[in-house]
């Protein structure tokens, strides 16, 4: 639930960032071009492969013999996916504020890993859902399905930001100093909201859920204010 709440908050913030370039947005294939062996890009790609390998290692089918453990393992890996998506959101926002092309490429690579994680975790959760679960465990699995979907969508937003930063950089377009400061204000709330959403998923903290709701309200308010201020 807390991830779903944040997803609405995140979309409003991304609307402000992307709206001026909406007519130039295109559908992305998600295909990542591999770099030459021995490059920094290859090392980063290997790091993403390790993220996926860690997930596959933990999702051992033998765990199905103990349904409660299977549910707990799935929950831990959804948190793992959320933490990776949070890192990617931070990279995308940093790229929007600085124009760093290295961050742009890293965001694209990580998004591919998140897509792979979504497929793997969804398949795993389908199998867990068919185990002998009590009512509470079934509700947890349903919530995990929703969380995986929302996290993957947030990853898509991060990639969209990176693509639009590349568009600006290719054309030597820059945000004004005022626009950068306003972006910092709204994206700080985005970062905080998603961070608390992931923590709530991890710990079940109601305090984190309340913080997500507060960030959502703040982003809604800033969205309206900044839209009026910057968009004619």
Image (tube, rainbow, N blue to C red):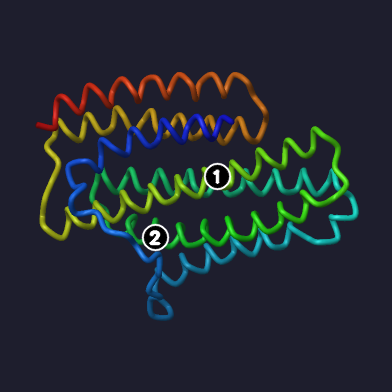
Residue 203 horizontal side relative to residue 181, left or right: right
Q: Which residue is mark 1?
A: 83
Residue 138 against residue 73 in the figure, above or below: above
Q: Where residue 40 sits in the image (x, y, percent)?
A: 40, 69
Nearer to us in this view, 189 or 17 = 17
Disc number placed over residue 108 in the picture, else none: 2
First in residue order: circle 2 vs circle 1: 1
Residue 104 horizontal side relative to residue 215, left or right: left
Q: Where residue 128 sits in the image (x, y, percent)?
A: 78, 51
Instruction: Name the residue rendered at 40%, 35% in the picture.
Output: 10
Residue 143 horizontal side relative to residue 219, left or right: right
Instruction: Name the residue rendered at 77%, 49% in the picture.
Output: 129
Quadrant the C terminus occupies:
top left
Q: Secondary structure at mark 2?
A: helix
Q: Where residue 58 sits in the image (x, y, percent)?
A: 74, 57
Spatial distance from mark 2 to mark 1, Cα to Cα?
16 Å
Instruction: Tell me the quarter of the picture where residue 32 sits.
Output: bottom left
Nearer to us in this view, 119 or 60 = 119
> Which residue is at the far bottom?
37
């Amino acid at each position: 639930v807390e991830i779903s709440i944040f997803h609405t908050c995140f979309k409003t913030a991304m609307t402000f960032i992307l709206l001026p370039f909406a007519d130039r947005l295109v559908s992305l294939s998600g295909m990542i071009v591999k770099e030459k062996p021995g490059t920094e890009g290859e090392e980063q790609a290997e790091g993403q492969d390790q993220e996926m390998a860690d997930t596959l290692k933990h999702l051992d089918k033998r765990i199905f013999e103990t349904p409660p453990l299977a549910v707990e393992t799935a929950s831990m890996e959804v948190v793992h996916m959320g933490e990776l998506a949070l890192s990617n959101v931070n990279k995308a926002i940093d790229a929007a504020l600085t124009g760093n092309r290295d961050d742009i490429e890293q965001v694209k690579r990580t998004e591919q890993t998140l897509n792979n994680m979504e497929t793997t975790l969804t398949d795993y959760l389908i199998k867990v859902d068919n185990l002998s679960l009590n009512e509470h465990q079934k509700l947890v699995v349903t919530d995990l399905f929703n969380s995986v979907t929302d996290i993957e969508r947030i990853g898509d937003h991060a990639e969209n930001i990176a693509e639009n930063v590349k568009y600006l950089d290719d054309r030597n377009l820059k945000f004004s100093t005022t626009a950068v400061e306003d972006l910092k204000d709204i994206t700080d709330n985005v970062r905080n909201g998603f961070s608390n959403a992931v923590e709530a998923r991890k710990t079940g903290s109601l305090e984190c859920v309340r913080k997500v709701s507060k960030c959502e309200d703040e982003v809604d308010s800033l969205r309206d204010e900044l839209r009026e201020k910057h968009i004619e």
